Image (cartoon, rainbow, N blue to C red):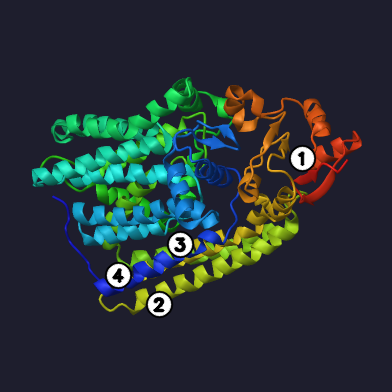
Amino acid sequence: MFDTTERQFLSRGALFLLLVAFAVLWFAPLDYRHLVPSDEGRYAEMAREMFVTHDWITPRYNGLKYFEKPPLQTWANALTYAMFGIGAWQARLYTALTGFVGILVLGFTGTRVFNRSVGFFAALALAASPYWFSMGHFDTLDMGLSFWMQVTLCTLLLAQRAHLAPWKQRFWMWACWASMALAVLSKGLVGVILPGAVLVLYTLIARDWALWKRLYLGSGLVIFFAISVPWFVLVEQRNPGFLNFFFIVQQFERYLTPAQNRPGPIYYFVPVLLIGFLPWLSLTGQSVRYAVRLQRQNNGFSPVLLLLVWAAFIFLFFSVSHSKLLSYVLPVAPAIALLIGLYLPHVERPQLHRHFVAYAVLLVVGCFGALALLRAGDARTPNALYRAYLIWVYAALVVGLLAIGLALVRLRASRTGATGPALVIFAAAWVLLISIAGNGYEVFAVQRSGAQLAPAIRAALAKLPADTPFYAVRGLDHTIPFYAGHTTIMVESADELAYGVSVEPQKWVPTVDAWKQRWNADHAALALMSPETYTELAKDGVPMTVIARDSRRVVVEKPNS
């Protein structure tokens, strides 16, 4: 049987105030930073184009068909634009909501499957993890995918509780099948392959064959296919060849071959998780050891074993992949947080004191290590930006140190030995630290985004005919189309729009020489290029008037004849 001991230390009113404060810290900064390439600019622009074209079936990016990913997040962002207008915080709202609600879902699951203490501390562990908190504030697909995969995991755990009424079991399993379908619509087959493989492995390890009788396979598959299949059918009807490109090229070849040029060593995700769960590292080993000693439920189901298999398999699955990005293993975070949440209520005061002191020392060391920013920088990202960011880093570290100091004071002042209040303060230290350091990235984001060039581009386009071409010479800029509110015509380099160019070749210019001919023939035109390309074309005598530039881009207009 599971340990159902509860150590309640917060009233409902205090818990509500804590949640409100956290919500403010979570959502308030969404509009502070500019969108950065490539993911944020890409997905914000895809939603903008869907919103302005009213084509909800065929996703487009920079005016070209873009079938690399399913449309769930693009739909959500486009709907957000429809409700609140187009902007950076609107582009991040869906991601932020999924991250925030994911914390609540984990707390609810921990409470119902184990007890209230586990639910609270699991949510606390996830909220204060740099991995989950940071990814919840960037417009990427992996946060949405991780949320729906988390819902899949959590509803399965909720459905398999012992002595559950049949109608409740059916409800949670139907929710499990529905969330798995939404995971597929978030990023493809991983939304069903990973949970399915975890379930099979769990069954083999636990020999829990009875579990399969409680999955509602028949009705569940009906729900899964009813939600996930219609878009794939519609988009294939309108765009023959889509299914081959999406499933073969983007799903299987991306995983099995280095075609996407995102390599990484087998240990690529080890430092990701170490840094991603930095506040809880010294307790993670004990958390796993504590969890594995817990007995199964009366019906033979082991939530702990499922959590361990979930975290281990997904980590290994992406570790052996030929395509790696930092966000790929984010779906393991809720499972790890729930395992940590099982142990946190039982941490003794001396152990927690050592934990806090060690992290205070770590932050002091971080203050010295941050001095390396004084020497960082290059032509594209000047040293002055790193020096400006250093101020934010020190602000984050100092606030974190002060809060950890307060946690130590609270821990020592506890006459009953209760560790809960001190753990809350410690988690708050990391939430504040991550938030301050993350918001400080605006120092770099404003330059990387190209947003400062957008007013000049919009002003130039406003004076020209509506059909004036705007070229992107030898490169795809992931933020200019969004901030300028205008797509560009690719020249010579198709970049990641190769598929769109292959099916709509009339929408691009294959060589710079061909572009020069069009440029000379155009009555009016704009072009975006790198400083190096601008220098080369200027030497070739191409007529251009610079209307905006920064260290990464030059925007030119064709002079009046």
Tell me which residue sits at (60%, 56%) in the image. 34
346 or 214: nearer the viewer: 214
Q: Which of marks 2 and 1 is nearer the N terminus?
A: 2
Q: Between tags 1 and 3, which lies in front?
A: 1
Question: In terms of image quadrants, where is residue 420?
Answer: bottom left
Amino acid type of the residue that numbered disc 1 sits on in the rendered structure: Ala
Describe the element under mark 3 as helix, strand or loop.
helix
- State which tag comes first along the sequence, 3 or 2: 3
Q: In this rendering, would 159 be left or right of 332?
A: left
Give the quadrant of the C terminus. top right
SS for callout 4: helix
Which mark, residue 15?
4
| Disc sitting over residue 525 in the figure | 1
Looking at the rendered structure, the kind of residue marked 4 is Leu
Q: Which of marks 1 and 4 is in front?
A: 1
Is 82 or 513 nearer to us in this picture?
Answer: 82
Instruction: Give the percent coordinates (x, y) of residue 248.
Output: 46, 21
Q: On the image, numbered disc 2 is attached to which residue?
A: 409
Task: Please state the horizontal and vertical placement of residue 326, each as a whole percent of the image.
Answer: 51, 43
Q: Nearer the viewer, residue 227 or 417?
A: 227
Kindly report the distance in space between the C-alpha atoms of the residues bearing marks 1 and 3.
40 Å
Give SS at disc 1.
loop
Q: What residue type is labelled 3?
A: Phe
Asked whether the viewer can see residue 20, the reply is yes
Q: Which of marks 4 and 3 is nearer the N terminus?
A: 4
Around disc 1, counting alpha carbons within 10 Å, would you say few (fewer than 14), some (14 to 19), or many (20 or more)?
many
Residue drawn at the location 27% of the way across and 46% of the way down: 154
